[in-house]
Image (cartoon, grey):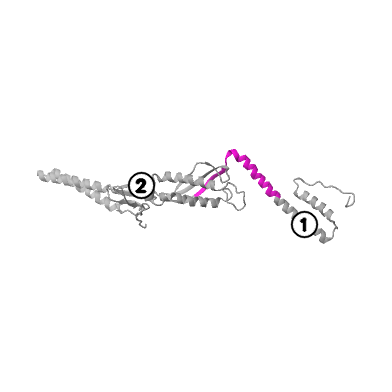
Amino acid sequence: MTNHIATPDGVREFTARSVGGGPALLLGLAGLLAGVGLVVAGAVATAVAAKVALIAAGVLTALASLIAMSGLNTVAPGEARVVQLFGRYRGTIRTDGLRWVNPLTSREKISTRVRNHETAVLKVNDAYGNPIELAAVVVWRVEDTARAVFEVEDFTEFVETQTEAAVRHIAIEYPYDAHDEGGLSLRGNAEEITEKLAAELHVRVEAAGVQIIESRFTHLAYAPEIASAMLQRQQAGAVVAARKQIVEGAVGMVELALTRLAEEEIVDLDSERKAAMVSNLMVVLCGDRAAQPVLNTGTLYQ
């Protein structure tokens, strides 16, 4: 790990000084046994001065060994220990296993595992003022343990609060459905919106030393009081779009029919009869119901 030093804008994580816990444990046990041995030797000594000296040395040796062994720490994978000495940050232990540090320090355990946070369903107004409901899930983890511990009061609560604030801000910046072509909308541009949400979250939680891995909306809908009206609007828009496509196809078919009739010289139509034919074909092609055939027993103009 690359060491970082504290800067005027806040503390940064760096590696704490620590040694392997195995040798430290063995030395501590050896000191404890030596102390017990001195106490036993003092108990069996005949001279009073030797008795007192041996027992005192044994007690002090055992006590010093116990104090030294209190510097042992077990660090599991996905965890870190933030080390403080008399209120000052002395580094972070990320190496897993048994480690030993200064026994006078305090060590706070911090989880560096990946975490999920899913917001409750929030009710906000979109860019058009329509009430909508949305929720999001954020995948995150602690990247800088020093900032997570010292820069904010509670980094977990901080992430949850900032996530909700970011989701609300994104919701009011964009409409649920864009009325203008090319405009971003929450429903039609999910990938782009989630990227913007992730970028805003990164800025908001950077002070806590937190890394945003992924963010995504899990719920997005109109509020119940306008859901039925918006559904009718969506249906009307779909009908208009379908009609537009039908009309474009019908115009092409009519144009093709008139062109083929003229090329094959099947019948010679004047402008009035062409207009009537176009009208009939458009009615047939664009109508909702099947056309009813009419048999003409007269001439073309009757």
Q: Mark 1 or mark 2, which has the lower sequence index?
A: 2
Q: In which quarter of the image is residue 132?
A: top right
Name the residue tied to disc 1.
255
Residue 65 seen in the figure = yes
User: Is 241 colored magenta in this rendering?
Assistant: yes
Q: Position of residue 194 (x, y in %)?
A: 52, 50
Label 1 to label 2: alpha-carbon separation: 78 Å
Are there few (<14), some (14-19), or many (20+) residues within 10 Å of tag 1?
Answer: few
Are there few (<14), some (14-19), or many (20+) residues within 10 Å of tag 2?
Answer: some
Q: Which stretch did the figure color magenta? A: 215-243
**SS assignment at label 2:** strand
Side of 51 relative to 178 (left or right): left
Rendered residue at 77%/57% (across/down): 256
User: Is 44 colored magenta in this rendering?
Assistant: no
Q: Where is residue 275 in the image (x, y as percent from the top left)?
A: 81, 53
Q: Which of 261 and 100 is in front in this view?
A: 261
Q: Which amino acid does label 1 sit on?
A: Glu
Side of 53 relative to 127 (left or right): left
Rendered residue at 60%/40% (across/down): 227
Q: Where is residue 152 in the image (x, y as percent from the top left)?
A: 39, 46
Q: Where is residue 195 in the image (x, y as percent from the top left)?
A: 51, 52
Q: Quick check: marks 1 and 2 in contact, CB under 8 Å?
A: no
Q: Residue 109 carries which label?
A: 2
Main secondary structure type of the part rendered in magenta: helix
Residue 46 seen in the figure = no
Quarter of the picture containing the N terminus is: bottom left
Q: What residue type is labelled 2?
A: Lys
Can you name the residue that lies furthest to the bottom here? 263
